[in-house]
Image (cartoon, grey):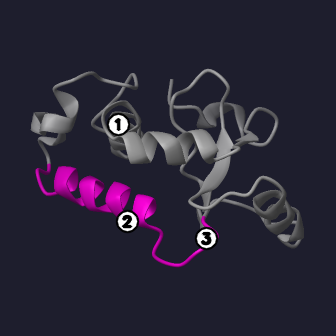
Amino acid sequence: MWLDSSLFVLDNFDWLFDHIERKHITHFTGFKLRRKKYFESWFIAAPTVQDPMISKWYGMLKDVAALHPRYTDHEYYARKNYTSNPSYFMVYQVYAYLVDTDSSFQNAHKEGAFLEAEGNMAPWGSPD
């Protein structure tokens, strides 16, 4: 489980474990804005340690970060920019790239049964 350090946790995570079990999530889940292809990176939960899809995403993100400060020179940016500021929102750029180009990741994304982010995040938190 990943939680951004800016989060205030006000309850236990029984609701999350229930959600994962009820929806039969095998890879990952979190919160998603309805209009976005990716889900919010401030909260990521996977039912298993070392989930292969999370590992793939993380590995590709490290590839992009290795190009600092010229992130957008990476091949993952050649297809399309998925956010208004792709060099800042690298985590979303790589995620959306994987959804578009990797069928196993796309299936994991579809299975994610994401929780609605609207109403659960500060209004300034959306990477439009």
Q: Quadrant of residue 110?
A: top right
- Indicate yes or no whether the magenta region holds residue 67: yes
Q: Quadrant of residue 76?
A: top left
Residue 121: % across, % down: 73, 41
Residue 3: % across, % down: 62, 65
Mark 1 lies on a secondary structure that is helix
- In three-dimensional space, the C-alpha distance between marks 1 and 2, rounded to whole angstroms, equals 16 Å
- Amino acid type of disc 2? Ser
Picture disc at residue 55: 2
Q: Quadrant of residue 45?
A: bottom right
- Amino acid type of disc 1? Gln
Pick the front one: 56 or 30 = 56
Picture disc at residue 19: none
Which range is magenta? 46-68
Q: Earlier in the sequence, mark 1 or mark 2?
A: 2
Q: Which residue is mark 1?
A: 93
Pick the front one: 95 or 110 = 110
- In three-dimensional space, the C-alpha distance between marks 3 and 2, rounded to whole angstroms, equals 13 Å
Question: Is 125 rendered above or below residue 81?
Answer: below
Classify 10 Å Cα crowding around label 1: few (below 14), some (14-19), many (20 and above): many
Mark 3 lies on a secondary structure that is loop
Between label 1 and label 2, give the one nearer the viewer: 2
Q: In the drawing, does residue 13 fall left or right of residue 79?
A: right
- Image quarter where the N terminus lies is bottom right
Q: For the image shown, how many numbered marks are present on the structure?
A: 3
Q: Residue furthest bottom?
A: 49
